[in-house]
Image (cartoon, grey):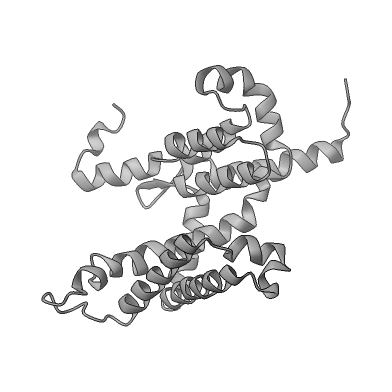
Amino acid sequence: MKHYDAKQIAGFAIPSAIGIMLFMVPIQVNGSWTIAVKVIADVVGTAFADFLPLLCVVIVTVSAVLGVASLSKPSFITSYPIINETFAATPIWATIRVVGAVFIWLTFMRIGADDEGSVLYMITCADAGGFVLNSLLTVLVIIFLLAGLLLPLLLDFGLLEFIGALLTRVMRPLFKIPGRAAVDCITSWIGDGTLGVMLTANQYENGYYSAREASVVSTTFSAVSITFSIVVLAQVGLMDYFGL
């Protein structure tokens, strides 16, 4: 049996414990359950609230422009793997990105948002495009940024391998997915489904999941989290039945 010194154990245990506390341990804030990363995202989102919608517009616009540009495979995209992986698109996806960019600019400029008789009202009103831009995208941008910085605490210090070795005999027979997916599933279910999808995509792209396994995790475990269930139950006045 291989023995590890205190430095090696600390290099595994400390980052992994921080990652678990940030992404997997539910905490109660102002009477509602959430996770630490979401709390940090809310603080950052509040601090930059006035700037975030414009940032979302810029991101979607750049994605659309470079997506269309990638169709001709220019060297300034294909020569850089990160840029190519991020912005390269098929004709269908390039078209979708352009449509999205048009919609987000219409919403940002509030064109037709106050005129219920306008054709654009259903796209740009506060309950449609306005909600997506100002309430959904702004939150997701911050969560993705934080997750990109902090997910390595779960991914790169041995936690997935450790849990995978322990739970392979459980996850494989029950769900036909690797044992390492236990961390992914718990993060999705207890924490936040969006973060779970990001973690699943990372594991798939690095060859740890097959396409089928990634699909199973994303469409079952990541579809609805406990925190999202609480939001829905609170909205419809059924929190008394949460335990059941």
Q: Nearer the viewer, residue 156 or 74?
A: 74
Tally of numbered discs:
0
Q: Position of residue 93 (x, y in %)?
A: 47, 61
69 relative position to 93: left or right = right
Q: Does 112 sit above or below residue 2? A: below
44 relative position to 179: left or right = left
Say which quadrant the N terminus sits in: top right
Q: Position of residue 90 (x, y in %)?
A: 52, 60
Q: Quadrant of residue 3?
A: top right
Q: Is residue 162 visible?
A: yes
Seen at 57% across and 27% down, the residue is: 177
Seen at 54% across and 23% down, the residue is: 176
Seen at 47% across and 49% down, the residue is: 194
Q: Position of residue 77 (x, y in %)?
A: 66, 70
Q: Quadrant of residue 123?
A: bottom left
Q: Nearer the viewer, residue 129 or 156?
A: 129
Q: Position of residue 153 (x, y in %)?
A: 67, 47
Q: Does 19 sit above or below residue 126? A: above
Q: Nearer the viewer, residue 152 or 178?
A: 178
Q: Does 168 sit above or below residue 132? A: above
Seen at 56% across and 68% down, the residue is: 71
Residue lying furthest left in this view?
A: 117
Q: Nearer the viewer, residue 76 or 235?
A: 76
Q: Is residue 18 visible?
A: no
Say which quadrant the C terminus sits in: top left
153 relative position to 102: left or right = right
